[in-house]
Amino acid sequence: MPRSSPPTDAIPEPVTVTEPRRAGRGLVPAVAARGVRGALDGLVAAAGQVGRTALAPAAAPARGILAAAGAAARARIGRADLDDRDSLLVRDVMPVAWMVASTWFRAEVRGLHHIPRDEPVLLVGNHSGGNVTPDSFVFALGFASHFGPERPMHVLVHNLVSAYPGLGFLRRLGTLNADPRVAKEALAAGSCVLVYPGGDHEAHRPSTQSTRIDFGGRSGFVQLALDAGVPIVPVVSIGGQETALFLGRGERLATFLGADRHLRLKSMPISLAFPWGLNVGDLLGHVPLPSKIVVQVLPPIDLRARFGEHPDQQEVYDHVTGTMQEMLTELGRRRRIPVVGWERR
């Protein structure tokens, strides 16, 4: 693999490290970290109040714009077609993608050998980075580098991504509307499918919660895996929530403006991001900070072999999210400096 490509399997499978601590060790950094989190939480509350106050006079026009945008988006959403994916285009964009991933995000994708080579799987990931999601980009590149662009992998995305002007080419790279029927069809055709159950709820969580798995109780992926008869492969990433300073999801703001009704957006996030400064909604995206992105693939979970012929959906959900949380906590423990991403071994 060229040097410019993101390294895969760069380190052995992480293990939980227990280390005796000396009395008082790390006390000052811990106090400082709590102080920073407290200050950011206060900033989140203040930003939310400022956003609601500032937008109040423009609420009615904003609702009208969002309603029109929702209608236009629905008109642009086409039927998902598995044949839209173009492996030749995937191959063509890989050199440029390698350069961006290696230089800007210093990306690493580890554990790709855990993905079975001869069967479809449901890849379940945690989502970060707002509407600009570098974790998806980095993992898709790592997958294509490891298995070759000819092996199909589809990523389930929000309908707005498919309908957004200028992003139609993403279908040719393997995106599909987030519809369980479409996902099941792709799995039946032999494709690997990547799903982010947390969606915009997780992708817009505050940066202070960057090491938290938060699917918001959305467990539909469990039933999808059971119906399709495929294993679940957890995919855990860190670094995306450091590509901007995410202050809050703006869920009440989304309801206030009607974004939940017209655009199926449960969040209208507030962040500090380049080049906008205070960024409300992130509808135009942002330029991500060069945060180091690390993606760790975990061993596959055969649901019926582990949980019996008729698994309890909540039990499986708790196991998958718990396993992913343990790994994300470990990746966060290793990460010494945000954005820079230096790791302690």
Image (cartoon, rainbow, N blue to C red):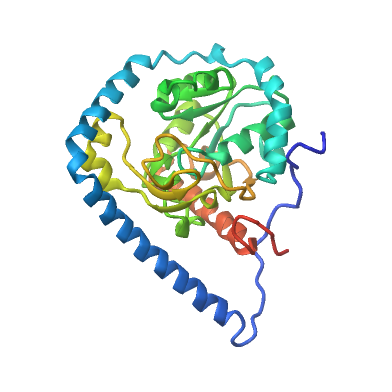
Q: Which of 343 and 231 is in front in this view?
A: 343
The foreground one among 51 and 34 is 51
Q: Which residue is drawn at 59% across and 20% down?
A: 190
* Image quarter (top left, top right, bottom left or bottom right) of the C terminus: bottom right
Report x, y in % for residue 181: 41, 21
Find the residue positioned furthest to the bottom.
23
Q: Position of residue 317 (x, y in %)?
A: 44, 46
Left or right placement of residue 95 versus residue 296 in this view: right
What is the quadrant of residue 117 in the picture? Answer: top right
Residue in the foreground of this view, choosing between 257 and 10: 257
Horizontal side, residue 201 vs residue 308: left or right:
left
Q: Which residue in the rendered view is the most extreme toward the right?
A: 2
Is 267 above or below relative to 63?
below
Is residue 183 visible to the viewer in this orientation of the structure? no
Report the label total.
0
Image x and y of residue 300, in percent = 61, 41
Quarter containing the N terminus: top right
Question: Residue at (44%, 31%) from the top-left corner?
Answer: 224
Does the image show residue 134? yes
Q: Which residue is drawn at 54% across and 51% down?
A: 324
Q: In which quarter of the image is residue 146?
A: top right
Residue 225, position as x, y percentages in the image: 48, 32
What residue is shown at x 41% (from left), y 40% (from top)? 282
Tell me if residue 265 comes above or below residue 333 in the rendering: above
> Front-most of 19 and 101?
101
